Image (tube, coloured by chain):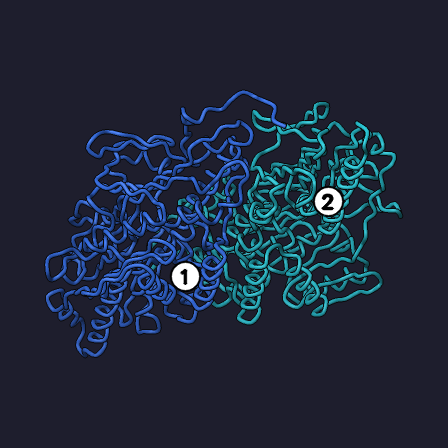
Chain colours: A cyan, B blue
Amino acid sequence: MTTIPHVTIIGSGFGGLYATRKLAGKEVRVTLIDRKNHHTFQPLLYQVATAGLSPAEIAPPIRAIFKRYKNIEVLLDKVTGFDLEHRQVLLHGDRVAYDYLIVAAGAGHAYFGHEEWAPMAPGLKTVEDATEIRRRILLAFEIAERQARLERKLAPLNFVIVGGGPTGVELAGAVAEIAHRVVAGNFRSIDPSRARVILLEGGPRVLPAYTEDLSRSAERQLRRLRVEVMDNCVVTGVEPHRVHYRDGSDGSLEASVILWAAGVAASPLGKMLDAPLDRAGRVLVKPDLTLPGHPEVFVIGDMASVKRADGKPVPGVAPAAIQMGEFAAKTILAEAALEATASGPREAEATEAGARRSFHYFDKGSLATIGRNSAIAEIGRLHLSGFIAWLTWLLVHVYFLIGFRNRLQVIWAWAWAYFRYQKGARLITGNSDSITPGEAHDEMSGAAKLETPSSLPSVPERKVS
Amino acid sequence: MTTIPHVTIIGSGFGGLYATRKLAGKEVRVTLIDRKNHHTFQPLLYQVATAGLSPAEIAPPIRAIFKRYKNIEVLLDKVTGFDLEHRQVLLHGDRVAYDYLIVAAGAGHAYFGHEEWAPMAPGLKTVEDATEIRRRILLAFEIAERQARLERKLAPLNFVIVGGGPTGVELAGAVAEIAHRVVAGNFRSIDPSRARVILLEGGPRVLPAYTEDLSRSAERQLRRLRVEVMDNCVVTGVEPHRVHYRDGSDGSLEASVILWAAGVAASPLGKMLDAPLDRAGRVLVKPDLTLPGHPEVFVIGDMASVKRADGKPVPGVAPAAIQMGEFAAKTILAEAALEATASGPREAEATEAGARRSFHYFDKGSLATIGRNSAIAEIGRLHLSGFIAWLTWLLVHVYFLIGFRNRLQVIWAWAWAYFRYQKGARLITGNSDSITPGEAHDEMSGAAKLETPSSLPSVPERKVS
């Protein structure tokens, strides 16, 4: 180990970003590796998926964030494995060494072992996911309009969201707002305000991480936005444009668009660390967030399985990832300082895991937004609902947005949307040949070919004047 | 023909959009058909390609523009042909009838018969083109940084733009600004300000549509932005990351990114109209912009070949398309009014082509932007260069941007970019697996597999600390 330790960080989500921030300008060398060139402000990703914000407004380039700090370098690359013995991260044909490693690669979607559902029911984790969901939502209205106008057929316009956690609730509220308010007057042959938005939750109530009174309030607020909430409804199958479920008896729903918000799985990098994992693929880290036997390797954020003092798991939310990132960085800085002041050679023995402090999660409270003027908040014993909770949510999220320019731009976009009932980013983009309704079903997944659902038949040529 | 004529318009570019605007709220029924759900403000597309603006800022949804006008319906669909005899537009398995038809499908790229160059050298016509070009430009820096850091190899960072028309000049200026100013301090292993930006023009001077003094001024302004201008340089071949050219002798240039701005070809819909075409595929319309023998079919904008009074062709610019769109709409409205007041049945004979006015292009002047504080303008005998021309360009373009919100947002984005030397939309998006530099070459086109250029070899694994 050189006097200036080299910290390699994988992932620029909240964990990786805040760890890097803590190390910026300090006596360490940092290499931040990410597959994307931008941070993704995930709490607002649903706004991109529902045409409220542009991708760039929630995705600042990582390099720009750290450009002033010469001790930080950013590499756009994909990690393919680890050589823990030689303290190296493996990339495509290359290696990056480290003295300390912080693995913060986050989580992806989980389909309960049915990965084949993914093309029919996309989840929301990346900017690309968001623009694909936006494309599907907006295209559904276009396809319905086209059918009504040319085939004189009023097909049901159903948006089914699977999973009543924070993302599912946000999506349901925002899709309802698009259908019932934003595009309501934009069509001539269909009435978008008659679209159904259906939220399927496997458990007895939405937002199960909250107290029961707040869950019930959230359901009331959802219903006010004309979202149909189906609790105790377990999805048993997904076909193109159809969802099968069980809620007592078996049933199925026709769906123009199916969105998946029912489960997450930790990044597959966890497996490559040769460490014990929990069922969701998270690494069972030690109390100092390190890999057993490797005090130099931290695993944080959605990749880490950590318990609170009361035995409950630390939730997979942004504040937890931020705290873990800062904790790991502080631990490294403390040891680096200790080592720098130690006169004798190799006194790093003092830095072994035994001497380490444990990570403690500080719960500042939780917020979940539902829609216009609708949210819930749980801050200690304080339970808030409706407008005041929504305002709190708004202020917290704008405050934490990375970058001054983004913040002002988002406020502007929101103010516009709020007062004018308009969304500023109603773009259907993608391969131009896949964008016409006639071909849309075939091209929806970009990978899997989907069948046209039986209830949306194509009809032979006919003349319409 | 019913008393309220049905006008079908194909394309929502400047021609189609302004024709529709003119007919909005009038005694006609309008069906506007487009493959996209949004207008594309093409004069600012290069700003999306160079990370200055987000796509949504220059691409308002068509439905939102016309939502207040109940006589206008919008259909998202792709036209597959025409049945001129029965006055029908053919879609996928459907038909839309018309009493009047306005064909305004614009133009695409032309590669001088070498369509196989397209994946290596994309052109700029759509929002998708723009985000793909943005991806390639930003990725080029990332790949260079990665090579320098991991392979200890400083590869040349060359951006080659083919074609010195307005788009080529805009792109060259904006890419130079990105390299030499915007990302200059963002990298640790490369110096982006040493990147070369090379503009290849086949003729003796850039912006050949302008007078020679303005062309020369444009070249001086480009050189001040450190763009290398090569006149009389004809491209003879394009390979992955290499451009072959002839300028007296044969030569070739290695290129990290190749952009194509050298030629346009009118929409293939022109061919389907069974009319005489010029070499660029434009329809040789009659002086009233209609198809010979079909006074009810107008062809306008970049699809129409029209001569001015002095015999020079009407240029393929937005003002010309706007004037043609409004001319076609006014012609239709005049005939509809005539017919409505005529008491006898079928007196539409009076509306035949002989009675029609001819289209006259009114040239308000031309503007071309080059970069920060750099532009040229030709307004009658007034020739402007530099800052004053740039300011004029700025005001004109913001003024013509469709939609109040977009206008303010663009002003904000530009002000930020101007005063902070920052670009707000530096997003590399696309398939997440194609985004890592190691795989970038293979996936660049999304369709064709490209070879890694011989001068950018991959090296065996090596350890870098």
Residue B16 placement (x, y as % from top left): 31, 60
Q: Quadrant of the C terminus of chain B?
A: top right
Image position of B209 (left or right of A324): left
Foreground residue, B248 or B57?
A: B248
Residue A319 placement (x, y as % from top left): 73, 52
What residue sits 63% from the left and 51% below the top?
Answer: A42
Estimate how packed mark 2 is, as few (under 14), some (14 to 19) or many (20 or more) residues with alpha carbons within 10 Å.
Answer: many
> Can you tell which quarter of the image residue B252 is in?
top left
Please tell me if label 2 and label 1 are on a single chain.
no
Estimate how packed mark 1 is, as few (under 14), some (14 to 19) or many (20 or more) residues with alpha carbons within 10 Å.
Answer: many
Amino acid type, mark 2 = Gly
The dot on residue A325 is 2
The dot on residue B62 is 1
Q: Quadrant of the N terminus of chain B?
A: bottom left
Helix, strand or loop for disc 2? helix
Report the chain holding disc 2.
Answer: A
Foreground residue, A135 or A240?
A: A135
Foreground residue, A107 or B410?
A: B410
Does A265 sit above or below residue B167? Answer: above
Amino acid type, mark 1 = Ile
Alpha carbon separation for disc pair 2 and 1: 45 Å
> Can you tell which quarter of the image residue A15 is in?
top right
Q: Disc 2 vs disc 1: which is toward the camera? A: 2
Residue B402 placement (x, y as % from top left): 39, 65
Image position of B405 (left or right of B295): right
Does A185 sit above or below residue A457? Answer: below
Q: Residue furthest top?
A: B460
Foreground residue, A183 or B160?
A: B160
What residue sits 12% from the left and 69% below the top?
Answer: B355
